[in-house]
Image (cartoon, rainbow, N blue to C red):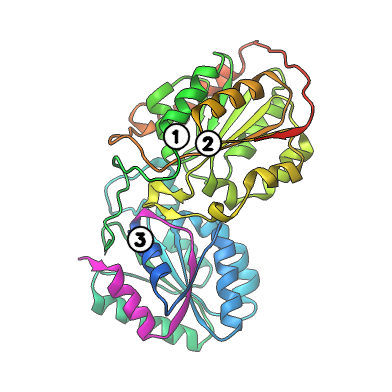
Amino acid sequence: MTMSTTTLLGLLKQQKYEFFSGVPCSNFADLFQQVSLDGDITSVPAASEGSALAFAVGAALAGRRSVVALQNSGLGNIVNPLTSLVQVNCIPTLLLISVRGHTDEPEDEPQHRIMGASTHALLDQLAIPWSEFDGTPQGFMATLLRAEEAFQRSISFAILVRKGQLSASLGVVVNGEQQLEGYSLSVGCALEIISEALRPTDLVVSTTGFISRELFRLSDRPENFYMQGSLGHCSAVAAGVALAHPSRRVVALDGDGAVLMHMGVLSTIGYASPRNFLHIVLDNEGYVSTGGQETTSVTSSLEAVAVACGYRAVSRCVTSAELGEAVARSLSTEGPHFLLCKVNQSHSRSLPRVTSRHTPEENKEAFQIALNQPRAFHLKAAPAGVAR
């Protein structure tokens, strides 16, 4: 059974929900776009699930009933605020959780398997009552009434939504030739330029989602470690490799949503200052792999944050010529470097998944073998600064 997102929002408003925050998932179709257009609900696109819950708690303290939407993989990011903020202070919140990797559905990507099998048990362990959505307006209304009973006891309630149970209304293109105006470079074109500049010995860690899938399509090599899951942790993994192997040049291929989710790591990288590290952020101002929901990078200067956090040199690019020059400069001088490249949201029609060729363990083992080859490089000293 399938219900439209407009019907879902109507039922939420009927029950006096006035505040919405969360982190997108493709299971929610166009829910985030629809709620942002609804004048009756205040909507905040949060960078992380924990922040979304904190926003909702603030709204609840001010007397407004709140909803937090997240993928079940993000449950790990809200355990602390759920227990030490929501439950300790008895501030109930409605959790709208999309379930990936459910045990009685066709096999999903490996990164969803563990949490998919643990979602029910984790909610039970946290003493949060939950209900599986059946895909009908009547079923959703019944779960809202159960949530109302929990709220009367100052307890949060979770509604679990599966793939295909919500239908989109805006015709969002997730994996097609969708070209947005504004920036000339696509992620694929940017990765072609970056890949051509890399030496065979250079190590790459790429963030989860379409960036890893585009890199896999264009330049699959043992020196690539593809992040699958763990959104926001690509740069820390890459910096950890760089610090442990200072004789190898390491590149983090990141996205704006991922950087925003754990932006504090920029300060840590600036402090640790790995000289062999290049952090490239492909900023399309959206979560394209989950439906094109907007990130907040459109109003943020991530390159300015990198400067303040202590990166040695920072660049901002919008053209292929600017990107090529910045990559060449960053790969030949001491880092850490931060390179922000504005890109559009177009992708090839068929993006292969890394798991079509490599299991996560096979990818890890190949990367470790390539990493431990006795190869070295030499960098020239470079003055700190910002290139634009």
**Image position, residue 63 (x, y; %):** 56, 86
Residue flagged by tag 1: what amino acid is it? Leu
Image quarter of residue 327: top right
Return the residue at label 3: 28
Q: Determine whether 270 is above or below 71 in the image.
A: above
**Image position, residue 100 (x, y; %):** 37, 53
- Left or right, 382 with reference to 256: right
Q: Determine whether 299 is above or below 131 in the image.
A: above
Looking at the image, the residue that sits furthest to the bottom is 152
Residue flagged by tag 3: what amino acid is it? Phe
Residue contact between numbered discs 1 and 2, judged by CB atoms under 8 Å:
yes
At x 38% / y 63%, what residue is drawn?
Answer: 33
**Image position, residue 119 (x, y; %):** 44, 59
The residue segment tinted magenta is: 1-26
The answer, for residue 58, to whether it is visible in the render is yes
The dot on residue 22 is: none
Image quarter of residue 134: bottom left
Instruction: Mark 2: give few (<14), some (14-19) or many (20+) Cα within 10 Å.
Output: some
The dot on residue 185 is: 1
Return the residue at label 2: 318
Mark toward the start of the polypeptide (3 vs 1): 3
At x 40% / y 41%, what residue is drawn?
Answer: 110
Camera-near label (3 vs 2) is 2
Q: CA distance from mark 3 to mark 1?
A: 28 Å
Camera-near label (3 vs 1) is 1
At x 60% / y 28%, what residue is drawn?
Answer: 251
Mark toward the start of the polypeptide (3 vs 2): 3
Label 2, secondary structure: give it. Answer: loop
